[in-house]
Image: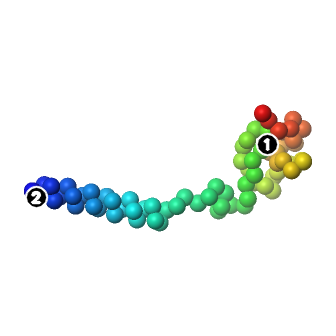
Amino acid sequence: MAKFLLFVAVIAVIYFFVRAANRRGKPPAAGANAESMVRCAHCGVHFPSAEAMSMDGQDYCSEEHRRLGAGP
Ligand SMILES: [Zn+2]
């Protein structure tokens, strides 16, 4: 019986820590801690919007990808 109670106590402690961790640590949204990130319409890489090459409402990571246009 003592072993059973110990087992229950361990489960309760684990449950408590999981609950606490979930409440504290929602992962921040992507790029929330930096300047806004944009996604290259050609290769899909994410990079700071300050470096974006924009055309027709799309953002590209480089002049070459802007020239190549949106990927498949
Ligand atoms: Zn690109």
8 and 24: which one is in front? Answer: 8
Tag of residue 32: none
Q: Quadrant of residue 71?
A: top right
- Amino acid on which the number 1 mark rests in the picture: Ala
Left or right: residue 65 versus residue 48 is right
Q: Quadrant of the N terminus?
A: bottom left
Tag of residue 41: 1
Q: Quadrant of residue 11?
A: bottom left
* Circle 1 Cα neighbour tier, 10 Å, few/some/many (<14 / 14–19 / ≥20): many
* Circle 1: element type: loop
Left or right: residue 71 versus residue 24 is right
Left or right: residue 32 versus residue 23 is right
- Residue shown at 75%/47% (left/top)? 39
- Amino acid on which the number 2 mark rests in the picture: Ala
- Residue shown at 81%/56% (left/top)? 50
Q: Is residue 12 above or below residue 67?
A: below
- Residue shown at 36%/62% (left/top)? 17
Residue lying furthest left: 1
Tag of residue 2: 2
* Circle 2: element type: helix
Residue 72 horizontal/vertical position (percent): 78, 33
39 and 4: which one is in front? Answer: 4
* Number of marks in picture: 2
Q: Is residue 38 above or below residue 69?
A: below
Tell me: is circle 1 under 8 Å from ligand 1. Answer: yes
Left or right: residue 15 versus residue 57 is left
Residue 56, can we see it? yes
